[in-house]
Image (spheres, coloured by chain):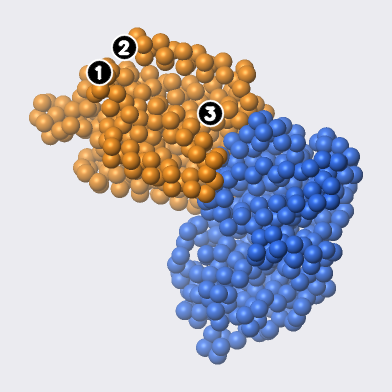
Chain colours: A blue, B orange
Amino acid sequence: MTGTYAKPGKYTQEGYLLCEKEINDKGGLLGRKVRFVVYDDKSEPPTAIKLYEKLITEDKVELVMGPYSSPVTNAASTVSEKYKKVMMASLAATTSIWERGFKYLFMTISPAEVYLEGLVDLAVERGLKTIAVINEDTLFSKAAAKGTIELAKKKGMQVVFHEAYPKGTTDFSALLIKIKALNPDVIAAGSYFDDAVATTRQMKELDVNPRMYGVTVGGDLPEFHQLLGKTAEYVYGSSQWEKGLPYPRIKEFVANYEKMWNREPVYHSAAAYGACQIYAEAIKRANSLESDKIREQLLKLKMTTAFGEYQVDERGFQVAHKMVLHQWQDGKKVTVWPSQVAEGKPLYPTPPWLRR
Amino acid sequence: MMTGVLGLLLAAVGGLAILPLFASGYLISFTIQVFMWMALAGSWNLISGFTGYVSFGHVAFFGIGAYTGGLLITKAGWHWLPAGLAGCLPAVALALVIGYPCLRLKGPYFAIAMLGLNEVVRALVSYFEGFTGGGSGVSLPPILSIVPVYYAMGGVAVAVTLLTYRIITSQFGLRLLSIREDEIAAEVMGINTALLKLYAFLLSAAFPGIVGGFYAWYASHIEPLSVFPLLTTITMIIMCLFGGQGTVLGPVLGAVLLSVFQELVWARFLFVHQAIFGALIVGVVLLMPRGILGVLQERYRLPRTI
């Protein structure tokens, strides 16, 4: 597991291997042991193409699971589709991947477009009117920003600013100064970890004071608060999964995971684990390893794993899984949306930097 | 000796020509990527190996070719073969625009200018979002068989190698080498170095453009980050140095050996492969600065024309 996505890639692998162990402890699948063959795609799409060719034509695997990230899944799925192998894409959130008309590709996590639905919802509930959106200019972040803008407009908010920045940007002051001049109620960032940390830090330096501020990826990691300390307080972050959610067998999953890997699972671990469980269930129901039979089951399957709900439309696109929005409160991540699973109330409004 | 090498080469080409008949998809896919590296390292060799003008931005031609191919296929509905071949046009045009002023620069300036060029092209591709898809890139339809791409990519690799042979056995090649050894002396001898360098540079840009065009079809998704990485230029350079710069078979040898090596080492040592790879490079540069072929030519008196 090397390259840009080394870290989440490792969590994904751990989730798969825990699922493998649990299935084998219960006697395997269709009476046979399950064995995962794992390779390092170096976070590069062309390497992934070569490796999925290897998995399917040389290692002769019977089933394939998705890699980590949208760009890599985008490339890998062209291979699995060619060989008519069902791929459970456990960690790809970009809608456009499912707009290519593939028959054997199934989605596990919620799409990028709804990552900040909670932020918009909470803002509208509190009567906020204006929103500024920034995003990294890459596949996932762009889709996340676009989705946020559409949701905000639909709910009657006014999008006063939208701009993208290239991957690798470290200085956001020009963007933030423009936003400061517009003084929006809400700032939403379609971000990964590094840029999420940098924008938050620079918002404090430049004294940019929205009433609510949320990021897509990065805000959910413990490192976010470790690096930023008090600056991370009041920041909203989105997540596909949290360990405190009321899903079946979630406590068991967290405990087994900690036992096997000596650390807490994050949502990447849970998504990989959940995808593997869903796949296994579909295979059991199909009672066969034939792609078309598994596909048929996956299309009509509705189930809830430790990762949450699963149900797809005719494209294999996820429609049931729910995102959560949390807020950093006193060094803890508190789930504040949706209300059915919320652990606490959002601290609102966010006080200006000078009074924190 | 020469006939021995020739016989070996013909056998290799013959073997590769029928490989898709019996090989697995993985082996075909792997070989396509080796062909790609052969063509890229060979193209870099044409300008940098022959004239000593080190290009640090060669991937710009690959990337612009990939976008040309990708957009012609998706927006204009072209067949992938002409679309890929068309990748050479903007690459050569770009080389003309940048090469004319920049090849007059000496020392590290050309290297840096090329590095800058790659960043400029990448930024432009991201900026013209309506046309190029910006950071989301371009999605192409998935390909049903990679065998045609195998032959197309192999064809480019062979073409680059044949052209290198043609150059090295001609006056043009000798003159280019004289620029590498001593540019001022070459000028004094009445050689129009500016024009020669420009010709070599245009040839050197055309092939990465085509390779990029075919790559877009093969990978079926391109984005600025995946087709303009600095690492691609560095890999071209390393392969060329490893095999032997300024030779015909050096880039071929470098591409094959390093690809195979990476593939084997990566499979066995998941976590340390990059360190091993790096150490190998340092070792080669220190112990064999003229590359494998350079050493073979000295030790075994292999002809200079291979």
Q: Which residue is mark 3?
A: B32
Label 3 vs 1, first from the N-terminus? 3
B129 versus A326 height, above or below: above
Q: Residue at x 47, y 78 (%)?
A: A206
Label 1 vs 2, first from the N-terminus? 2
Where in the figure is residue B157, as x and y percent of width and height?
44, 24
> Which kind of residue does numbered mark 2 sit on?
Met
Q: Are marks 3 and 1 in contact (CB under 8 Å)?
A: no
Work out how far the residue at label 3 is from the one at label 1, CA to CA, in angstroms.
32 Å
Q: Which residue is mark 2?
A: B1
Where in the figure is residue B301, as x and y percent of width and height?
25, 18
Work out how far the residue at label 2 is from the one at label 3, CA to CA, in angstroms.
30 Å
> Which kind of residue does numbered mark 1 sit on?
Arg
For residue A32, what is the image quadrant?
Answer: top right
Where in the figure is residue A275, as x and y percent of width and height?
76, 52
Q: Chain of mark 1?
A: B
A191 versus A283 height, above or below: below
**Marks 2 and 3: which is nearer the front?**
2
Work out how far the residue at label 1 is from the one at label 2, CA to CA, in angstroms.
9 Å
**Marks 3 and 1: which is nearer the front?**
1
> Which kind of residue does numbered mark 3 sit on?
Ile
Q: Are marks 1 and 2 in contact (CB under 8 Å)?
A: yes
Image quarter hosting the C terminus of chain B: top left
Residue neighbourhood size for the residue with mark 1, other residues' Cα within 10 Å, grouped as few (<14), some (14–19), many (≥20): few
**Residue A108, visible in the rendered structure:** no
Where in the figure is residue B302, as x and y percent of width and height?
28, 18
